[in-house]
Amino acid sequence: MDRVDHFGRDLFVVLDREDGRPLRVQLEEQLRDGVRSGRLRAGTALPSTRALAQELGVARGVVVEAYGQLVAEGFLVARRGSATRVAKVAPAAGPAPAATAARLAPVRFDLRPESADRGAFPRRAWLAATRRALADAPDADLGYGAWAGAPALRAVLAAYLGRARGVVADPDHIVVTAGITQAIALLAGLLHARGARRVVVEEPGFWQHRTILQRAGLALAPVEVDERGMRTDGLPQAAAALVTPAHQMPTGAVLAPERRAALLDWATAHDALVIEDDYDGEYRYDREPVGALQGLGGGRVIYLGSTSKTLAPALRLGWMVLPGALAGAIADERGWSDGGSPALDQLALATFIERGELDRHLRRMRLRYRRRRDRLVAALGDHLPDAEVGGVAAGLHITVALAPDADVDGVIARALERGVAVFATQHAGRALLLVGYANIDETAIEPAVRALAAAVRG
Ligand SMILES: Cc1ncc(COP(=O)(O)O)c(C=O)c1O
């Protein structure tokens, strides 16, 4: 501690006079890092400039300037007559200061492909279903439930998935999960415990699921995706393949019929499983919906579905339809980890589907999403006429390929500065913007695309 002069004990700030950098810069940096890391939480009141200056043994002006800079960057909020506080924003996990400051700009246009339209959640119908489920549930349903999930929900799901997605489902082979996220974690754990070491994944693919597989000790065998979905010529040896056939995440490609057949042949030849992530299969706009692969799969496909893209991620409700031989083992994995999903939520979902509310909601939303998608594609044609737009046939996002030499981080940062939040990925040496339309009003699409186009042009 001999090089350290003074601590700001209230804030855990340490200034080092031999560091060579101005004390103001050190103070700013540490406060900025504190906010970013979440150590200084939103709304926290900072000491007065006088008190902190005294504690640190610096001129008050040093603290005044540091606070001022951080207010300008959006990390702190100053209000006359009250303490300077940490801004009410989610701290970002460590990007460069410029990007962070931009990230903190308020999001006016949310084009992130994350969830169903959060503003369109059918609150009233959900509440009614919850009430009905609670009123009807016998006392026995309030005890510890079946690890695989409430029998009433599994029966309703079997009928719904057969009808809407062409899934061949026996209620006894369904396991209710906390979303697809948990389904993949359960599968990864079980596969690894049974000796699996490698899983084929789509390249590019959904990073979160890759992380889950890797955390379970499974190696990834990435296989390239093109405009017809994942390539199936020369699939490597692996215990399973995790795919998004209805609407590839993130490229938006729909897996071509001959590739579906080839994937299933591969699974048979290698005694492997196909894990079908049908996260947004309910949305297909211009043609007949593509049924689930599971319906063709002859017992080698594990089907995964979720309410995150139809209702809301907050429900944390999803399901797996498993080959009979795996259903019990997966239900056990689930049960031993947390005893299963909350019964009342499951019963509410069963009631919601049974009453036709999910169908009604989806009919309404498909029309709405389709109109937004059409507007989005038209606006991109107007404002970024050279952009290659893809993945428009299904789902809740489209892709926009940037020029090969585009600085994608710059595009994202400039978009944020204009209030547009959007995700990007890499595909075949190009950056792809992933432009979601589930959480933007139809009328906001034109100004959002204009701002995005300005960010792309730099
Ligand atoms: C590829 C993919 N699968 C599944 C999900 C949904 O996961 P969960 O059901 O855990 O919310 C998402 C959500 O964004 C997704 O992008």
Image (cartoon, rainbow, N blue to C red):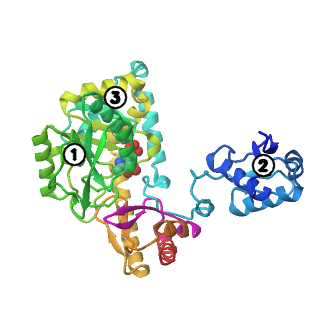
Badge 2, how many Cα within 10 Å: few under 14, some, many 20+? many
Instruction: Decide if residue 26 is in sight here.
Output: yes
Task: Out of 234 and 454, give the one closest to the viewer.
Answer: 234
Decide: is 328 above or below 260: above
Q: Inspect the image, locate mark 2, and give the three-letter code of the amino acid beneath it.
A: Leu
List x then y, in percent, for residue 112: 46, 59
Label at residue 181? none
Cα distance between the residues tagged 1 and 3: 20 Å
Q: Quadrant of residue 276?
A: top left
What residue does disc 1 label? 163
Task: Out of 314 and 420, give the one closest to the viewer.
Answer: 420
Where disc 2 sits, the SS reads: strand
Q: Are marks 2 and 1 in contact (CB under 8 Å)?
A: no
Q: Quadrant of residue 98?
A: bottom right
Badge 3, how many Cα within 10 Å: few under 14, some, many 20+? many
| Magenta-colored span | 415-444
Determine the residue positioned at 26% across, 42% down.
Answer: 199
What residue does disc 2 label? 15
List x then y, in percent, for residue 195: 24, 30
Say whether residue 211 is magenta.
Answer: no
Lower position in the chain sequence, tag 2 or tag 1: 2
Determine the residue positioned at 27% across, 25% down.
Answer: 329
What residue does disc 3 label? 149
Image depth: mark 1 or mark 3 in front: 3
Instruction: Name the side, left or right, on which 223 lies relative to 140.
Output: left
Instruction: Name the side, left or right, on which 166 lies relative to 440.
Output: left
Badge 1, how many Cα within 10 Å: few under 14, some, many 20+? few
Q: Inspect the image, locate mark 1, and give the three-letter code of the amino acid beneath it.
A: Arg
Q: Are marks 3 and 2 in contact (CB under 8 Å)?
A: no
Where disc 1 sits, the SS reads: helix
Decide: is 302 above or below 165: above
